[in-house]
C-alpha cells in the first residue's frame, strides 16, 4: 500500500529526529549503572524501538555504562520474541543463568520468559504495580535502590 509506506517513512524520519524529545533517565539509574559497571556487571539495552534509535539513545544517555543496545532490525523480532535479548546476550557473552532482565511491562515479563531468564519488574514505568502482578511479575522494585538490591543480592 503506497499510502501506508509514505506515512511510515514520514513517521520514521520524524522519529529519528525526535526520539530523545522528553526522554531522560529515571532518578538514580545512571548512578546505579556506574556502580554496576565498576563491579564488573555488563549491561545492555533491549528495545522495540528501531535499532538505530535504541543505539543512539544508549549513546546519548548511558555511554560508558551500557555495552550494547539492540532494537528491532531485520532478523531481530520485536519483544516479546526473545530475539533482542538473545542478541544482547550473545554480544555480551552472557549465559541465561547469569542474566537478568529489567523491565516495566507485561511484554518485558513475557520477553524474559521467552529468553529463559529471570525478570525484575520496575514499578515506575509503563505499567502499575497491580498490572505487573496480574501479568505474573515475580520480583518488583520501586526505585533504583530497590533495583540495586535485587540485582546485587
Image: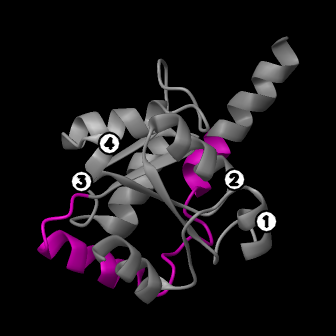
Determine which residue is flagged by label 4.
96
Q: Counting other residues with Cα less than 10 Å from the Cα at mark 4, is it few (<14), some (14-19), or many (20 or more)?
A: few
Is residue 124 located in the magenta-colored stretch of the structure? no
Q: Quadrant of residue 62?
A: bottom left
User: Which of pointers 2 and 1 lies earlier in the amino acid sequence?
Assistant: 2
Where residue 63 sits in the image (x, y, percent)?
Answer: 27, 64
Determine which residue is flagged by label 3.
67
Q: CA distance from mark 2 to mark 3?
A: 25 Å
Q: Nearer the viewer, residue 74 or 53?
A: 74
Circle 1 sits in a helix, a strand or a loop, which is it?
helix
Q: Is residue 89 left or right of residue 80?
A: left
Label 4 near label 1: C-beta < 8 Å? no
Magenta-highlighted residues: 13-42
Determine which residue is flagged by label 2.
106
- Mark in front: 2 vs 3: 2
For the point 45% across and 53% down, the residue is 118
Where residue 5 sits in the image (x, y, percent)?
Answer: 76, 20
Where residue 52 sits in the image (x, y, percent)?
Answer: 45, 40
User: Which of pointers 3 and 4 lies earlier in the amino acid sequence?
Assistant: 3
Q: CA distance from mark 1 to mark 4?
A: 26 Å
Amino acid at each position: 500500500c503506497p499510502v501506508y509506506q509514505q506515512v511510515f517513512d514520514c513517521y520514521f524520519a520524524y522519529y529519528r529526529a525526535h526520539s530523545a524529545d522528553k526522554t531522560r533517565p529515571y532518578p538514580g539509574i545512571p548512578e546505579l549503572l556506574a556502580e554496576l559497571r565498576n563491579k564488573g556487571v555488563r549491561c545492555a539495552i533491549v528495545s522495540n524501538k528501531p535499532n538505530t534509535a535504541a543505539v543512539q539513545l544508549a549513546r546519548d544517555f548511558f555511554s560508558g555504562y551500557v555495552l550494547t543496545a539492540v532494537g528491532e532490525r531485520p532478523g531481530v523480532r520485536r519483544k516479546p520474541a526473545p530475539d533482542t535479548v538473545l542478541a544482547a546476550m550473545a554480544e555480551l557473552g552472557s549465559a541465561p543463568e547469569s542474566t537478568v532482565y529489567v523491565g516495566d511491562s507485561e511484554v518485558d515479563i513475557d520477553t524474559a520468559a521467552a529468553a529463559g531468564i529471570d525478570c525484575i519488574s520496575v514499578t515506575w514505568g509503563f505499567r502499575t504495580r497491580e498490572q505487573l502482578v496480574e501479568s505474573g511479575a515475580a520480583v518488583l522494585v520501586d526505585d533504583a535502590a530497590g533495583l540495586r538490591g535485587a540485582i546485587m543480592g
